[in-house]
Image (tube, helix red, strand yellow):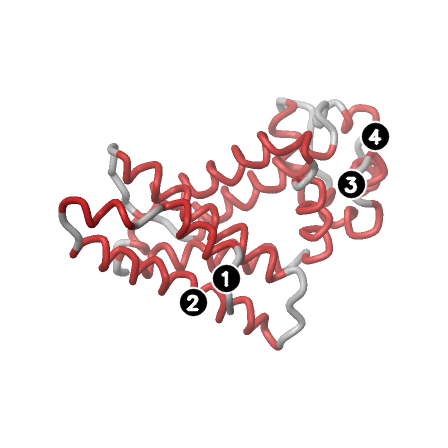
Amino acid sequence: MQTDFSEMTLEEMAQALAPAVADAAVFDGWTDLAIASAAEMHGLDPDVARLAFPGGPMDMIAAWIATVDRAMVEALPADVLAQMGFTARIKALLVFRIEQAAQRRESLRRALAVMALPKNAVRSARLSWQAADLMWRMAGDTATDFNHYSKRAILASIYAATLAVLVDDDSAGQAETYAFLDRRLEDVVRFGKAKARLTGGEREHFSIARLMGRLRYPAS
């Protein structure tokens, strides 16, 4: 059954096409060829499909991420997350996204290469921040002080580092990726406990930037 695009906005069209574009990106990269392949699969004029991605590869990747966001919201509603502890909620949300990405690892590899280009740095950072923000909000975070920003920065760093491990993980069931994620989450829990014990000037010895560096470039 073909998708009816006639009443869709361009944003809706982009998200409807995004999974097929991601599939085609395995062979064609995040290019017009991938859009054309996705359009053909859906019986849509490729020229019309291209209108949904005026920003090129980053628009395609952003639409793909948006479909993962939507799937995550549907798969892990508030009543399901409410049955878990806070840390377990964050892990469940991260695991869901990793499972989604693992289905298209080569597309992910190519997406990360596009996102790493200097010209895409600002938008890539914004997309990472938005993903982290959504996960924290779904987990029930209501912080509005500095913790609001530090939590999102740390989670975005964990997520990005885990995806970087995933693209080269050939272990059964991506066991190495999940072990890596567990270590990074344990780092954050330990940091939180240590920070809670600190008072006065001692607090200044701990740096969010240093922690993020450890999470992104771990020693093991």
Residue toward you, 64 or 208 = 208
Q: Callout 3, which amino acid?
A: Ala
Give the position of the N terminus as an image quadrant: top right
Q: Give the number of the disc on residue 46.
A: 4
Looking at the image, tell me whether mark 3 or mark 4 is earlier in sequence order. 3
Task: Name the residue that disc number 2 marks.
Answer: 183
Q: Callout 4, which amino acid?
A: Pro
Residue toward you, 136 or 181 = 181
Looking at the image, tell me whether mark 1 or mark 2 is earlier in sequence order. 2
Query: Is 107 left or right of 70, judged from the image as shown?
Result: right
Task: Name the residue that disc number 1 marks.
Answer: 218
- Cα distance between the residues tagged 1 and 4: 43 Å
Looking at the image, tell me whether mark 4 or mark 2 is earlier in sequence order. 4
Of helix, strand and loop, which one carries label 3? helix
- For the residues carrying marks 1 and 4, which lies nearer the camera in this image? 1
Of helix, strand and loop, which one carries label 1? loop
- For the residues carrying marks 2 and 3, which lies nearer the camera in this image? 2
- Cα distance between the residues tagged 1 and 2: 10 Å
Q: Callout 1, which amino acid?
A: Pro
Residue 62 position (above or below residue 84): above
Q: Residue shown at 61%/26% (left/top)?
A: 11
Q: Give the number of the disc on residue 38.
A: 3
- For the residues carrying marks 4 and 2, which lies nearer the camera in this image? 2
